[in-house]
């Protein structure tokens, strides 16, 4: 390919709404262009790398025995009504009607579609296990698309669905996918962590997420360097602290004028925030208001709370709802003296708290030296976020935390969809059984961005060699110099004849501009044709490490093949 005939519109600057380095570089290097909020066009360079990632995914999925299909993006509502999910998802689902007024959605995921396909075409245990996958565009109307293609409203996903006769079969399929995912992300040169994850409302028993370690990641992961325990903070557990028991002190109401936050209260009373009992009021889908209690230095984990109480909708109580329970405005809520009817859930760590501070349910007042006999907790449980510095639930070692970008998520679904959609098979006794399913997703476009997040420097993208949009860039220092231009053309042709994916930068630009562009788009190897031509030599410049090497013209093919270890 020659830059004079190519389409790679590079930019020097990008608008400030590109907050992450991958978003900035994908725009500047001419990989994508924004069509609308959360909707992108992939230009030639971006498309080429996308295809390389897809091929890695395809190869490893097929190696695991999965079979590729391509399902429709348009999905008929009937299937989502059968699975009761048509009304479960609200604004996030892109819905539309066809010319006959029939309801459709643009597929955000394909559990229903794949289950319907298999129930209509598989009927015997002899035809299982089966793992079907696709690489297809997904549509989700994210409330806040951000970070370029990392959280977009239209994205490319590899999604796979496995069908087995029983739990044991599912465990084997799940294990195969787990190994395939490791091979895929290893081949993408990604530094990632596999974490135990929440299954969300997709159902199923357990799931793992593949998290690319990155400060711009929206997910928080907790892990133990010692024993390898790692989990999304949504699900991560830590050892409950046992507070030192003190002898009971005299309870006392104290004036705390306008002190409404834990930190201000701890400072005002010169105590640790863990000596304060934090009370957070929530409402559920039945509009019941209930109170959560945790040590003041803990945060509520709403996913754990919902699971513990079996709640579908959880919202922070409004000022009115708080007033109804505490007869007070927010900031002074506490469990002492409220109506016995109000349901109280407390984190396990509250069990060992003594002489703690609570809101007095009176404006500008708190009560110190309160103890557990002053109120009734309906249920104790783990409703807190595990944090860095907590003790590992598995080995007791100190836990670490980092941010992650979720690039893969695999689920043991069980029989949720096969029961709802009657995807059954006849077992060897001729008895009808529901298939046991798993589902497995990789964000292809998100993986592209994650690779850039982890592979860049001040000059631009530093692709892992085998993922770069071109393998070599041939750059004559001065295209007007006949000898340089001819040699560049010759080298370009020679490389093409050896199946090297080469870009000839034949633009009439200063060499510095060419170097800047080629380094921005991250081509791993530049062959520079300049003054050394008189000694029959050219300069190889390597993108990562920025080293330079003079080679004889006759050795170029050898050198390039060595660099790509193609020999
Ligand atoms: O997609 C999954 C689970 C797995 C992930 C891997 C590949 C197969 N599906 C979970 N999920 C996420 N967002 C959604 C958004 C909408 Cl609007 C929807 F209608 C459904 C879903 C939905 O089900
Ligand atoms: Mg997920």
Image (spheres, grey):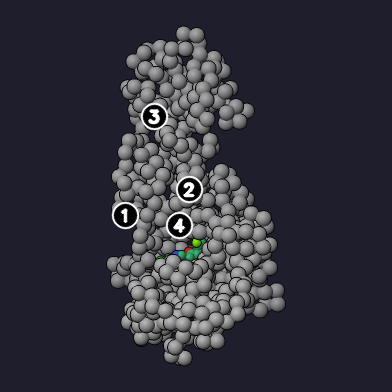
Q: Which residue is mark 4?
A: 218
Q: Give x and y (percent) for residue 86.
A: 41, 73
Relative vertical location of residue 146 with respect to residue 465 in this rendering, above or below: below
The disc, 3 or 2, on the residue closer to the chain's N-terminal end is 2
Residue under the image location 37 percent in, 61 percent down: 142
Are discs 3 and 4 less than 8 Å apart at CB?
no
Residue 274 visible in rendering = yes
Q: Give the CA separation, mark 3 to mark 2.
A: 23 Å
The disc, 2 or 4, on the residue closer to the chain's N-terminal end is 4
| Label 4: few (<14), some (14–19) or many (≥20) C-alpha neighbours in 10 Å | few
- As helix, strand or loop, the secondary structure at mark 4 comes to loop
The disc, 1 or 4, on the residue closer to the chain's N-terminal end is 1
Q: Give the CA separation, mark 3 to mark 1.
A: 29 Å
| Label 3: few (<14), some (14–19) or many (≥20) C-alpha neighbours in 10 Å | some
Q: Give x and y (percent) for residue 280.
A: 44, 76
Q: Which mark is residue 516?
A: 3
Viewer-closest of 8 and 324: 324
User: Does residue 75 appear left or right of residue 564 in this picture?
Assistant: left
Q: Give x and y (percent) for residue 544.
A: 51, 32
The disc, 3 or 4, on the residue closer to the chain's N-terminal end is 4
How many numbered callouts? 4
Residue 44 visible in rendering = no
Q: Nearer the viewer, mark 3 or mark 1?
A: 3
Name the outermost residue toward the right: 429
Q: Which residue is mark 1?
A: 37
Q: Which mark is residue 450?
A: 2
| Label 1: few (<14), some (14–19) or many (≥20) C-alpha neighbours in 10 Å | some
Q: Which mark is residue 47?
A: none
């Amino acid at each position: 390919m020659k830059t004079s005939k190519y389409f790679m519109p590079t930019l020097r600057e990008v608008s400030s709404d590109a907050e992450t380095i991958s978003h900035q570089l994908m725009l500047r290097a001419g990989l994508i262009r924004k069509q609308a909020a959360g909707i992108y066009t992939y230009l030639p360079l971006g498309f080429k790398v996308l295809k390389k990632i897809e091929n890695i995914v395809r190869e490893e999925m097929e190696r695991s025995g999965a079979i590729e299909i391509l399902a429709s993006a348009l999905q008929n509502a009937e299937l989502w009504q059968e699975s009761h999910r048509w009304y479960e998802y609200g604004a996030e689902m892109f819905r539309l009607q066809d010319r006959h007024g029939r309801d459709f959605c643009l597929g955000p995921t394909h559990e229903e579609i794949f289950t319907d396909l298999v129930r209509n075409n598989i009927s015997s245990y002899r035809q299982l296990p089966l793992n079907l996958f696709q690489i297809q565009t997904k549509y989700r109307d994210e409330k806040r698309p951000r970070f370029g293609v990392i959280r977009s409203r239209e994205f490319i996903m590899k999604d796979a669905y496995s069908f087995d006769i029983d739990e044991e079969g599912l465990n084997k399929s799940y294990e195969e996918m787990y190994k395939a995912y490791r091979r895929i992300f290893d081949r993408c040169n990604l530094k990632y962590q596999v974490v135990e994850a929440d299954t969300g409302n997709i159902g199923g028993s357990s799931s793992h997420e593949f998290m690319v370690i990155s400060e711009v990641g929206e997910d928080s992961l907790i892990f133990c360097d010692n024993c390898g325990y790692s989990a999304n903070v949504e699900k991560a557990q830590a050892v409950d602290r046992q507070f030192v028991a003190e002898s009971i002190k005299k309870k006392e109401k104290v004036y705390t004028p306008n002190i409404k936050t834990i930190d201000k209260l701890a400072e005002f009373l010169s105590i640790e925030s863990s000596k304060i009992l934090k009370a957070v009021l929530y409402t559920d889908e039945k509009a019941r208001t209930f109170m959560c209690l945790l040590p003041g230095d803990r945060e509520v984990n709403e996913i754990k709370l919902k699971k513990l109480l079996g709640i579908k909708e959880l919202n922070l109580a409004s000022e009115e709802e708080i007033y109804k329970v505490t007869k007070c405005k927010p900031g002074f809520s506490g469990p002492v003296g409220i109506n016995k009817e109000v349901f109280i859930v407390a984190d396990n760590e509250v069990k060992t708290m003594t002489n703690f501070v609570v809101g007095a349910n009176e404006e500008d007042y708190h009560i110190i030296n309160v103890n557990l006999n002053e109120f009734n907790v309906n249920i104790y449980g783990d409703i807190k976020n595990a944090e860095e510095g907590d003790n590992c639930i598995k080995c007791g070692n100190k836990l670490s935390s980092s941010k992650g970008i979720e690039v893969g998520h695999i689920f043991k679904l069980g029989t949720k969809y096969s029961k709802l959609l009657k995807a059954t098979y006849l077992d060897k006794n001729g008895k009808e059984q529901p298939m046991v399913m798993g589902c497995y997703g990789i964000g292809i476009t998100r993986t592209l961005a994650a690779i850039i997040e982890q592979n860049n420097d001040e000059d631009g993208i530093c692709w892992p060699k085998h993922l770069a949009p071109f393998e070599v860039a041939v750059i004559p220092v001065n295209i007007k110099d006949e000898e340089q231009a001819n040699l560049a053309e010759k080298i370009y042709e020679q490389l093409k004849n050896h199946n090297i994916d080469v870009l000839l930068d034949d633009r009439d630009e200063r060499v510095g501009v060419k170097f800047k562009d080629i380094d921005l788009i991250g081509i791993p190897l530049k062959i520079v044709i300049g003054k050394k031509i008189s000694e029959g030599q050219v300069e190889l410049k390597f993108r990562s490490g920025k080293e330079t090497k003079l080679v004889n013209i006759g050795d170029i093919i050898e050198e390039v093949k060595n660099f790509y270890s193609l020999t």
